[in-house]
Amino acid sequence: MANLNHPKDLKYSKSDEWVRVEGDEAVIGISDYAQDQLGDIVYIELPWDAGQDVADEVKFGDIESVKATSELISPISGSIVGVNQDLKENPELINDYPYDKGWMLRIKVTNPAEIDALMDADAYLKYLQGR
């Protein structure tokens, strides 16, 4: 776990998703830890059309690797304004670039208090060490 990257400017959920706040919008993806645990990602199912809503702690998709299939759980609530279409053909971007080219959703935040309830990078690392 020592070689994994967990940027300090992001917030993290216990289900290993990250959130980058950009004004009244947020970008969501999975952490370096999560992609490392999954192994080589071969498929991802996301709500590919913008306009759908996601809810805090509710499934928004699935991610499949050579090891397992896992649910993607939204760390916050909002309305989807963008989806990373590149992941349809290149889901391995999540393994290679979990915090930039491997982002999943961009949402318009509906409840900013949910962001405050997420962990910062230091708390997330401490959380991971206890697993």
Image: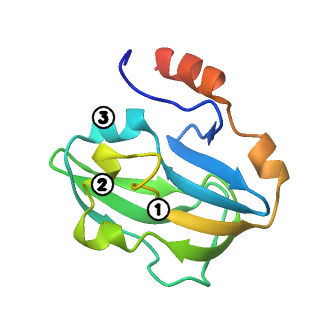
Residue lying at 44% horizontally and 28% vertically, measured from the top left: 5
Give the SS element for disc 3: helix
**Residue 98 coordinates in the image, percent (x, y):** 40, 46
| Left or right: residue 103 compared with residue 62 | right
| Left or right: residue 42 compared with residue 11 | left
Q: Is residue 46 above or below residue 42?
A: below
Which residue in the protein does label 1 denote? 104
Find the distance from the CA under tag 2 to the CA under tag 3. Answer: 15 Å
Find the distance from the CA under tag 1 to the CA under tag 2. Answer: 10 Å
Residue lying at 40% horizontally and 36% vertically, measured from the top left: 32
Which residue in the protein does label 3 denote? 37
Mark closer to the observer (1, 3) = 1
**Residue 82 coordinates in the image, percent (x, y):** 55, 75
Give the SS element for disc 2: helix
**Residue placed most toward the observer, 129 or 81:** 81
Which residue in the protein does label 2 denote? 93
Q: Earlier in the sequence, mark 1 or mark 3?
A: 3
Residue lying at 67% horizontally and 59% vertically, measured from the top left: 26
Residue lying at 39% horizontally and 38% vertically, measured from the top left: 34
**Residue 73 coordinates in the image, percent (x, y):** 52, 55
Give the SS element for disc 1: loop
Please identify the quarter of the rendering in which residue 25 is found. bottom right
